[in-house]
């Protein structure tokens, strides 16, 4: 205890001697140099002295985002917004964290706030349209994107988003017209790639496959095409084809976290539990705040009769994604297998709550329905 | 389908938009090379020549306004006159705008020559309505099978008078419930082993056409953009009911006291009562649509605990809800325990559960090879040895719920074929298409399915409900020399229907367990006699365990015969069946 007190005292003395600004500047340089441990220590030190230091909070948010620690990024960004609620950079960054987790419902109001403060913020307007599309508000999304398109008719991103939203709205004709413009703006290879992605996002997987295969024909080394093909084949349940594509990606780039995750999950879902584990371990390391690798690892361990290891992994999965009924279910089964009946019962009761909640949310409101008749 | 919910089709997204049934959006796995093994059974539809020509009127032909029109009904093989030949009960629905004249439930008496006579009116069973399920059992232990039918908005108990007629005794029996409810699955079960059959009813949804919007009113009720009837998601769930038999012709509602009424949050359909955990007491399993299925374990004190989640049969192996419709129960892996086959919606697999003791059930769908088939909305299911090779096969019927869809999406036809998976004997099943006979590949919009030997020729046939068409009667014709054994269990101390009695049969190093159950398929009733294919074995050892606790063993029982076993006297009759 004495040595800890001594260390703390020394730290305070050091910090006092070295101004908060100095510590911050060094941390910022470390962040720019991707020396994340040093940067993190520095920003944390600043915050111990100045807990409401917005710059430190938002830089920490950037750091956590870059190191795959989404939950911590969300925490520090939210703290920053409590100090500076109208800071559009923080709002945008927080929205992006949610968006990367495909939590469109949480991202939407953040982007909406940015647009309310800065109506001409192009990126926020596009991201707001994406969120609207994914949360079922297709008409407003289309209106936003059509306005953006009118202002920037050759912007590839806008063309892509508008085409995708038209597809989601089952408006094939308009989508086709937009994709034609995309071809002219982006060039054939890139346009095919973006078209493939638009079809994939609209769950039109056979069409997505067609486009990505065109890309491979035109440019076999086009970045990302084999990963996208792998995802398409997963959706089409063509396991062997998916494995082939994902293995190709990892051959070229063994550290590709997405490919590792998809391949690992695919192998686990196909019953090849031991084969999937190394890939999922890599994905887990690269994205420590993403619940899904923990889930699939947990499933693999459970099915390989290692319930105790499965429990640890699945507990992490539910901590990262507290509303994921599937993870609680598997956790409950693993706990049962470990003889931890009371905890298993608790986990399965959480499944019951989540399932009941989802059912409740879907139940027709009698009053509204009667009125609709 | 988002990346957060992962891997495209592999871990299904949230339920489809709008109030609908749960589908996981799964594409079928690629089929492997066929085994090339011959299949010696062939199923042919002989309904027309058998006299089953009246259509089962159920809802609209081109479209349905409400979910009650889409769900269909069950059927039963039963021997209502105790002549040793299976008779047939076919339930009916109606039409919202009024049914054609002559629409009614129908009872067909077996003429013992491959044909049947419609005796509905004579039997006093003429009735029109939205009927769902049936269970058959001798609730008053007078030696004659009675019939309980569920439906919306009410259920009916028919007492068999023993003279070819039935009387509606619903009110006298205390089975008339308050208000309108949609009874669906039902089963007689002697849960407390007092020798009297009690009654369990699963209810489907709270349905009131004054509240539920008709198709086309609410555009969240759509299937891939086509407007359809709403539900079940979006409609309020129901709770099951349990009635204890007082032993005097009446029942007492113990739904609350027993704890079954606590089971909320599910849309109950087919119900099976069987002793899955081999402890001498029945459990009750309910296939539930788009919500967790239910498993009621009897606590031996008048109460039940619902623990389907803990037993691994509420959800699929990834913890997701499925649209549970039909149930087959049988010892498909010959381990001496009862497994479960549950059918689901299109773009989902059926589920095959193997019992694993204290850990409950294990979902063996994928490793069994069933995941090659996800094309159809699936209903009445059976685990049965169709070719008598000693390995139970899997069979189920299919048919869409949305007649409106096929015009826009021909890849989702309204009428679809039956599904047959033959047991390869190594833990795997192989889907057969035309190899199963013309009755398998014929497309219909089917629901209920019952299995039984209607022509007493030593194999298992199938009775199938087809919506807005006559039923199918699939006669099984077997080639080759595979042998069989059929057991008829006559209870004297246990309930007279022997519901809950079980037989473990050993033959050539294999063993198979079957139990007399009072509902299976989809809301339907199978032949009460237990049929075992024996392959090449000429005899088998039989162990019978009765609900009363009496256990009997019989060594080297000869094959190719129906053996009648009395609870106190042992084998009292054996009858060879001539090959058709």
Image (cartoon, grey):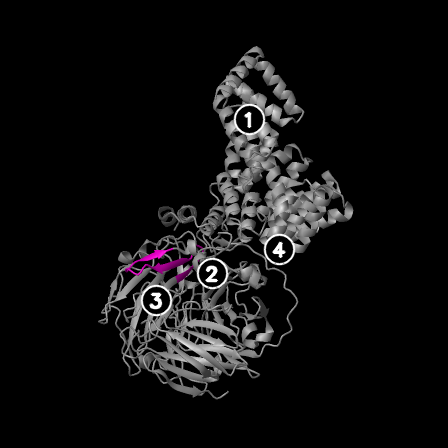
Furthest toward the front, the residue is A2
Q: Can residue A159 be seen in this view?
A: yes
To which quarter of the image does residue B179 belong? bottom left
Spatial CA span between label 2 and label 3: 33 Å
Residue placed under numbered mark 3 in the picture:
B150
Spatial CA span between label 4 and label 2: 29 Å
On the same chain: label 2 and label 3?
yes
Residue placed under numbered mark 2 in the picture:
B356
Find numbered disc 3 in the image and state the secondary structure of the residue it sits on. strand
Find numbered disc 4 in the image and state the secondary structure of the residue it sits on. loop
Residue at 42% across, 63% down? B69
Could you say where residue A149 lies in the image, as x and y percent from the top left? 64, 36
Q: Do the residues labelled 1 and 4 touch (CB within 8 Å)?
A: no
Residue placed under numbered mark 1 in the picture:
A90
Q: Can residue B111 be seen in this view?
A: no
Spatial CA span between label 3 and label 1: 60 Å
Circle 2 chain: B
Find numbered disc 1 in the image and state the secondary structure of the residue it sits on. helix
Query: Residue B49 versus residue B493: which sits nearer the camera?
Result: B493
Spatial CA span between label 4 and label 3: 40 Å
Spatial CA span between label 1 and label 4: 40 Å
What label sits on residue A237 in the rendered view? Answer: 4
What span is in magenta?
B285-306
């Amino acid at each position: 205890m004495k040595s800890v007190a001594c260390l703390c005292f020394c730290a305070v003395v050091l910090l006092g001697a070295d101004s908060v600004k100095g510590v911050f500047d060094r941390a910022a340089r470390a962040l720019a140099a991707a020396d994340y441990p040093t940067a993190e220590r520095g920003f944390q030190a600043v915050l111990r002295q100045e807990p409401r230091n917005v710059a430190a909070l938002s830089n920490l948010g950037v750091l956590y985002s870059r190191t795959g620690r989404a939950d911590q990024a969300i925490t520090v960004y939210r703290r920053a917004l409590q100090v500076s609620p109208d800071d559009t950079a923080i709002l945008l960054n927080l929205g992006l964290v949610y968006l990367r987790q495909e939590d469109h419902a949480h991202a939407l109001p953040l982007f909406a706030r940015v647009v309310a403060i800065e109506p001409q913020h192009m990126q926020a307007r596009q991201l707001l349209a994406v969120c609207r599309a994914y949360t079922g508000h297709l008409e407003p999304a289309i209106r936003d994107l059509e306005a953006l398109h009118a202002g920037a008719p050759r912007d590839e991103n806008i063309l892509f988003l508008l085409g995708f939203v038209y597809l989601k709205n089952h408006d094939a004709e308009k989508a086709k017209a937009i994709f034609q413009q995309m071809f002219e703006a982006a060039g054939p290879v890139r346009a095919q790639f973006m078209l493939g992605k638009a079809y994939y996002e609209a769950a039109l997987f056979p069409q997505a496959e067609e486009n990505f295969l065109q890309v491979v024909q035109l440019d076999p080394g086009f970045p990302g095409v084999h990963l996208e093909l792998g995802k398409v084949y997963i959706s089409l349940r063509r396991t062997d084809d998916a494995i082939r594509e994902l293995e190709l990606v990892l051959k070229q780039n063994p550290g590709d976290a997405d490919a590792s995750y998809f391949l690992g999950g695919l192998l686990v879902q196909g019953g090849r539990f031991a084969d999937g584990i190394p890939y999922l371990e890599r994905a887990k390391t690269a994205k420590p705040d993403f619940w899904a690798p923990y889930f699939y690892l947990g499933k693999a361990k459970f099915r390989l009769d290692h319930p105790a290891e499965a429990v640890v992994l699945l507990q992490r999965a539910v901590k990262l994604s507290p509303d994921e009924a599937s993870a609680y279910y598997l956790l409950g089964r693993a706990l049962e297998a470990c003889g931890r009946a009371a905890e298993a019962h608790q986990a399965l009761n959480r499944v019951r709550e989540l399932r009941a909640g989802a059912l409740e949310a879907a139940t027709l409101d009698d009053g509204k329905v009667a009125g609709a008749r | 389908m988002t990346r957060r919910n992962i891997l495209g089709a592999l871990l299904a997204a949230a339920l489809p938009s709008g109030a609908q049934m749960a589908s996981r959006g799964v594409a079928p796995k690629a089929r492997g090379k066929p085994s090339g093994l011959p299949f010696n059974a062939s199923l042919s539809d002989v309904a027309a020549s058998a006299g089953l020509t009246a259509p089962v009127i159920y809802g609209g032909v081109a479209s349905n306004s409400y979910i009650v029109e889409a769900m269909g009904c069950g059927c039963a093989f039963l021997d209502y006159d105790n002549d040793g030949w299976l008779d047939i009960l076919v339930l009916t629905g109606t039409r919202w705008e009024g049914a054609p004249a002559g629409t009614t439930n129908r009872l067909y008496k077996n003429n013992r020559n491959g044909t049947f006579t419609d005796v509905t009116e004579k039997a006093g069973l003429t009735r029109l309505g939205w009927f769902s399920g049936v269970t058959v059992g001798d609730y008053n232990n007078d030696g004659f099978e009675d019939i309980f039918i569920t439906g919306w908005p009410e259920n009916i108990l028919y007492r068999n008078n023993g003279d070819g007629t039935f009387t509606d005794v619903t009110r006298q029996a205390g089975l008339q419930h308050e208000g309108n409810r949609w009874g669906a699955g039902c089963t007689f079960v002697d849960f407390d082993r007092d020798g009297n059959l009690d009654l369990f009813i699963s209810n489907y949804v709270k349905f009131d056409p004054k509240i539920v919007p008709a198709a086309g009113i609410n555009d969240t009720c759509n299937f891939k953009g086509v407007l359809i009837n709403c539900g079940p998601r979006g409609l309020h769930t129901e709770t099951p009911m349990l009635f204890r038999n007082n032993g005097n012709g009446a029942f007492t509602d113990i739904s609350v006291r027993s704890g079954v009424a606590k089971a909320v949050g599910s849309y109950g359909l087919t119900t099976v009562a069987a002793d899955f955990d081999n402890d001498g007491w029945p459990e009750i399993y309910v296939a539930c649509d788009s919500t967790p299925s239910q498993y009621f374990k009897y606590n031996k004190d008048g109460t039940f605990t619902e623990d389907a989640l803990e037993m691994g049969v509420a959800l699929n192996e990834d913890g997701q809800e499925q649209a549970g419709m039909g149930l087959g129960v049988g010892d498909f892996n010959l381990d001496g325990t009862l497994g479960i086959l549950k059918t689901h919606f299109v773009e989902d697999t059926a589920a095959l559960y193997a019992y694993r003791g204290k850990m409950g059930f294990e979902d063996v769908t994928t490793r069994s090879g069933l995941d090659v088939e996800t094309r159809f909305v699936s209903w009445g299911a059976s685990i049965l040895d169709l070719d008598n090779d000693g390995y139970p096969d899997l069979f189920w019927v299919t048919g869409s719920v949305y007649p409106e869809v096929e015009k826009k999406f021909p890849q989702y036809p309204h009428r679809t074929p039956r599904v047959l998976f033959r047991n390869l004997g190594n833990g795997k099943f192989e889907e057969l298409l035309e190899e199963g006979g013309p009755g398998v590949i014929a497309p219909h919009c089917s629901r209920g399915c019952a299995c039984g030997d209607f022509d007493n020729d030593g194999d298992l046939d199938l009775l199938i409900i087809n919506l807005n068409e006559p039923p199918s009667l699939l006669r099984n014709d077997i080639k080759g020399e595979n042998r069989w054994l059929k057991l008829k269990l006559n209870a004297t101390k246990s309930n007279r229907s022997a519901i809950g009695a079980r037989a473990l049969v050993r033959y050539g190093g294999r063993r198979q367990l079957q139990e007399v159950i009072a509902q299976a398929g989809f809301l339907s009733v199978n032949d009460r006699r237990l049929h075992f294919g024996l392959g090449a074995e000429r005899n088998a050892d039989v162990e019978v365990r009765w609900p009363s606790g009496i256990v009997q063993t019989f060594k080297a029982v000869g094959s190719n015969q129906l053996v009648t076993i009395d609870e106190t006297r042992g084998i009292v009759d054996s009858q060879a069946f001539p090959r058709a």
